[in-house]
Amino acid sequence: MTGVLEVVAEPHRRRILDLLLEGEKSAGEIVAALPLSQPGVSKHLKVLKDAGLVTVRQQARLRLYRLRPGPLREIDVWLAPFRDAWNERLDALESHLDTMEET
Amino acid sequence: MTGVLEVVAEPHRRRILDLLLEGEKSAGEIVAALPLSQPGVSKHLKVLKDAGLVTVRQQARLRLYRLRPGPLREIDVWLAPFRDAWNERLDALESHLDTMEET
DNA sequence: CGCTCGTATTCCTTGACGGAAATATTTCCC
DNA sequence: GGGAAATATTTCCGTCAAGGAATACGAGCG
């Protein structure tokens, strides 16, 4: 699981990041918010931590996770040229004209 | 393979999209540019087509693929709140202070 | 200092995906 | 229409990631 894009491709992991936009959350809070077992969530948290997308801090018996959005820039960078493209091109029209087969 | 993010998580598929930034390309040209068998490329092209990221047009015996970046907006939209976050927060500092264990 | 709550780790099963080879299909040229 | 070139589809296999159950670990409270 090298790239950030692969990491956030997983829907549950995106959900976790979304949650952390609200601020620090304990592992337990995250477990409660997801339709997943505690070990399942813990594993995803590890993946996110390894990718540098979250940091952990221990407070009392809790592990508090905090968002660290920096690595997401990588996606933004990759996206940039396409963003230019979708501003210039009129996609809807093109697809209507091009699509002579499909499905 | 529902979401656009899952589709572009695959490195070869990203490579194909990058290629198409230069303009229309035939399937053959794309095969030549990738370290993959022809069927492999064809399968990826199908995934991209199903995701609405490319359109196909037949010219002579060639199938010409064209970029259709519109659906990538979905990623941009998801990214937006995090983009705000990484502008406000000073990630490097935080990680330095928070990380008391790891690895 | 032992117990318990919170969380991480291991182990296993399962399903999905990527890749190659072989084959089918389509389209044009003669 | 026959054949060849371009591309799609099918089949099969290997790998890898995700999920759950059970288990281990660790920190703080009593």
Image (tube, coloured by chain):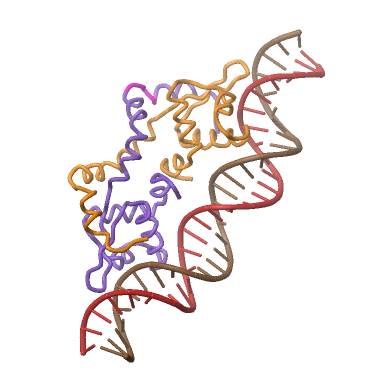
Chain colours: A orange, B purple, C red, D brown
Residue B84 placement: quadrant: top left
Q: Residue furthest left?
A: A88
Chief SS of the magenta region = helix
Residue A102 placement: quadrant: bottom left
- Front-most of A25 and A47? A25
Q: Residue at x 17, y 45 (%)?
A: A88
Q: Please, is residue A1 above or below residue B63 in the view?
A: above
- Front-most of B92 and A56? A56
Residue B89 on the magenta segment: yes
Q: How many marks?
A: 0
Q: Residue at x 56, y 23 (%)?
A: A29
Q: Is residue A21 left or right of residue B24?
A: right
Residue C10 placement: quadrant: top right
- Front-most of D26 and B48? B48
How far from the left and from the top, in percent, is residue B25? 25, 62
Q: Please, is residue B91 above or below residue A5 in the view?
A: above
Q: Residue at x 20, y 42 (%)?
A: A87
Q: Please, is residue A80 above or below residue D28 in the view?
A: below
| The residue stretch that appears in magenta | B88-92
Q: Quadrant of the C terminus of chain A?
A: bottom left
How far from the left and from the top, in percent, is residue B102? 55, 30
Residue A85 on the magenta segment: no
Q: Is residue A22 left or right of residue B32?
A: right
How far from the left and from the top, in percent, is residue B32? 31, 66
Q: Please, is residue B92 above or below residue A1 in the view?
A: above
How far from the left and from the top, in percent, is residue B64? 26, 64
Q: Residue at x 42, y 22 (%)?
A: B94
